[in-house]
Amino acid sequence: MSDQHAILTLGDEILRLNIVNGTEGPGTIDIAPLYKQTGLFTRDPGFLSTASCNSQITYIDGDAGILRYRGYPIEQLAEHASFLEVAYLLIHGELPTRVEFAEFEHVITNHTMLKEGLFRFFEGFHYDAHPMAMMVGVVGSLSAFYHDTIDIHNPEHRIRNAYRLIAKMPTIAAAAYKHNAGELVIYPNNQVSYIGNMLRMMFATHCEPYQIDPLAEKALNLLFILHADHEQNASTSTVRLVGSSGANPFACISAGIASLWGPAHGGANEAVLNMLNQIGSVDKISEYIARAKDKDDPFRLMGFGHRVYKNYDPRAKIIRDVCYAVLEQSADANNPLFELALRLEEIALNDDYFIARNLYPNVDFYSGIIYRALNIPENMFTAMFAVARTAGWVSHWIEMLEDPEHRIGRPRQLYQGAQQRVYQPVSQRS
Ligand code: CMC
């Protein structure tokens, strides 16, 4: 707590509000006592200026294009770390020692299986059910299988379930993929890496040997690191809000998956490919750029712009080169869709409308293209994102429960509806 304060004048009354500073980034005006003292709420739709919690996990400076997990720049983690190392860092706050990492990897590897009953859930879904719909349902129902170890006040249970979720997400996502493909599920193989297993469970079949493509593994490891956390975004805030009522971790992460699904959030990578398909050919780009600029047209260039990054998205900068490498090696390299994507990127980057509003390609512009080049179907893109983001979600859920200031999240509102009126029986209404 600092001795700085902000002064709020309300008529004749002068109110001193404490300024609370973090270790980096903008400080906050502590308005918690405001309602008690003034009878007024603050109003901030979309949380443009509101810090909803204290956190020590991820730091973003959107103007400078900075993203750090637990203090480590994303560029360093992307270059040197594995996704599981990053998951450990997010949860525990420190990079693991060699022994700690070996132990963590062992535990995660040994929790990848699903109960057979859970695999059977998939049979109940329609053949073309969206993978995110299946994931919302199956992840939520994990609580029906582990109800004897979901005491959220028990630190050992919290960690065990965090690990369970990280371990089982690839298995669940891959089972959703197999359901859509009409193929038998492939069980996890404990001899294979976390990322390799994800690829195997999706693309191997029971009749052919399967070789994990090292470039695909590298690209996925990188994408998972970049997507592992992003502080208080919509889905993470959802996980925190659901968890604040004391809900179990599986229900919380299921709610996070639902929030991530939206096209303005994690659904953007799928929306990018839908948009490229809609544009169809390079000669149509200018028509769609004009539509994106037209205020009367709801069309937006998907994969461009970001609420926080108003300069550039550091994740996009890291993934761009890998995107090009994957495209070069792709068996589908001559797909006109990829040429279209690269032309769109070039045109938008040089267009005054996009330059003036700092609308740069974000991470999901490139992740969508990479997933497509790896033959991952469009409806699986956001599911891949959900697998990676689980590491961040569980870290925030644990942090929230350990925060002594934590209480149930209960936003207030500015009521603009009808004032009191008198009910009339339906027989008397004209
Ligand atoms: N295409 C065309 N115009 C845009 C776009 C876009 N993609 N994004 C923003 N604008 C314009 C917007 O119309 C507004 O113009 P003006 O100032 O003339 O009214 C200006 O840029 C500022 O936009 P905003 O809506 O105030 O920005 P926001 O911070 O509320 O929205 C966003 C951020 C990400 C929702 C938005 O940029 C968008 O819808 N982008 C496309 C969806 C997308 O790619 N989302 C993925 C984000 S990265 C993954 C993740 O972290 O979840």
Image: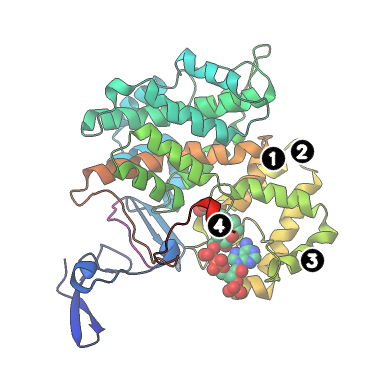
Give residue 9's position: percent from left, percent from top: 24, 84
Q: Does 267 appear above or below 252? A: below
Q: Is mark 2 within 8 Å of ligand 1?
A: no
Q: Nearer the viewer, mark 4 or mark 3?
A: 4
Q: Amino acid at mark 3?
A: Ser
Instruction: Name the residue tied to disc 2.
Output: 332
Quadrant position of ligand 1? bottom right
Mark 2 secondary-structure assignment: loop
Question: Extreme top residue here?
Answer: 207
16, 65: nearer the viewer: 16
* Mark 2 in CB contact with mark 1 (< 8 angstroms): yes
Q: In the picture, which quadrant includes the N terminus?
A: bottom left
Judge whether residue 52 is colored magenta.
Answer: yes
Examine the image and state in which quarter residue 25 appears. bottom left
Residue 333 has which mark? none
**Marks 4/3: CA–CA distance:** 54 Å
Instruction: Name the residue tied to disc 4.
Output: 429
**Marks 1/3: CA–CA distance:** 25 Å
Of the image marks 1 and 3, the number of the one nearer the N terminus? 3
Mark 4 secondary-structure assignment: loop
Q: Amino acid at mark 4?
A: Arg
Q: In the picture, which quadrant includes the C terminus?
A: bottom right
Magenta-highlighted residues: 49-56
Residue 286 has which mark? 3
Q: Amino acid at mark 1?
A: Ala
**Marks 3/2: CA–CA distance:** 25 Å
Instruction: Name the residue tied to disc 1.
Output: 373
Q: Is residue 396 among what the camera can see?
A: yes
Give residue 263's position: percent from left, percent from top: 59, 50
